[in-house]
Image: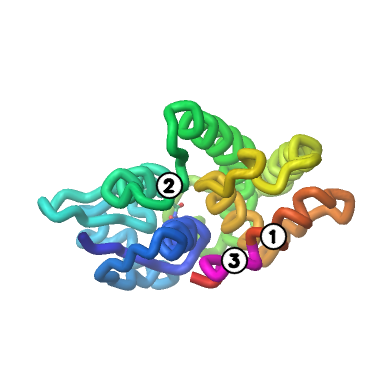
Amino acid sequence: MKFYNSMGPNPQVVRMFMAEKGISLDTQEVDLMAGENRQEAHMKRNPSGQMPALELDDGSYLSEISVICEYLEEKNPDSPLFGSTPEERAETRMWTRKIDLNICEPMGTGFRAGEGFPLFKDRIPVFEETSAPMKKVAAHYLSWLNDQMAGKDYICGDRFSYADIHLYCWVAFAGSVGQPLDAGWRNIAAWMERVGSRESASA
Ligand SMILES: N[C@@H](CCC(=O)N[C@@H](CS)C(=O)NCC(=O)O)C(=O)O
């Protein structure tokens, strides 16, 4: 297997996941700032032109971070981060989907149409006027999640999971590009510290 890595929150999710599970893969860097991920060689790995991608031993490729991580978990079932039972896995997937659709996607759109506009304007359809409303959507659902996190250490209660990794990398990234946490989101702030103190957070 080979991991195609770059800067950005999505590759970081996979790196953090692999660090948690002690997975080490042959890795090739792709220069996202220079647009190498939109050139022919990478488009063959991921027709969406995005990072990261995983090359499998049969020469085929996977993209989409939650899919890559679920595949790596199936291949490396020890220390499960999706869960040990069908119920736990369903709970992890349920929260991951809520987080991805309602928080990470609008955060990403807010960034690409805002601070990231110069980089993305000639790559994908981006509309500057959508930046502020998308950031508001992400903030609305983070505020909602803050309430949901009352009394919980992790997104799935007392079980650290892939859902924590996915959201942590996105919230950390968003904070560095003009989408800071609201001072009132104390449960999210405490959770960020808890997850950020794990060694894997610097992967
Ligand atoms: N839904 C995709 C999102 C991938 C994505 O947006 N990756 C970013 C890096 S964090 C990217 O490739 N940006 C550069 C570009 O789109 O040209 C996933 O789950 O992997």
Q: How is the model colour-coded? A: rainbow
Q: Secondary structure at mark 1?
A: helix
How far apart, in angstroms, are the residues tagged by discs 3 and 1? 7 Å
Position in image of residue 111 (x %, y %): 62, 55
Quadrant housing the N terminus: bottom left
Please tell me which residue is depicted at 40% across the width and 67% down the height of the picture: 6
Q: What are the residue bounds of the magenta stretch?
A: 196-201
Residue 19 is covered by the magenta coloring: no
Please tell me which residue is depicted at 69% across the width and 43% down the height of the picture: 138
Q: For the residues carrying marks 2 and 1, which lies nearer the camera in this image?
A: 2
Residue 200 is covered by the magenta coloring: yes
Q: Residue 194: which numbered mark, if any? A: 1
Q: Does the beta carbon of the residue at mark 3 sit less than 8 Å from ligand 1? A: no
Q: Is residue 200 left or right of residue 157?
A: left
Tell me the crowding category of disc 2: few under 14, some 14 to 19, or many 20 or more residues within 10 angstroms, Cα based: some
Amino acid type, callout 3: Arg
Q: Is residue 23 left or right of residue 144?
A: left
The reply to whether residue 179 is visible in this rendering is yes
Question: Mark 2 — residue?
Answer: 80
Position in image of residue 127 (x %, y %): 59, 46
Q: Are marks 3 and 1 in contact (CB under 8 Å)?
A: no
Amino acid type, callout 2: Pro
Which image quadrant for residue 32?
bottom left
Disc count in the image? 3
Question: In terms of sequence position, does the residue under pointer 2 or pointer 1 come before the other?
Answer: 2
Question: Mark 3 — residue?
Answer: 198
Q: Are marks 3 and 2 in contact (CB under 8 Å)?
A: no
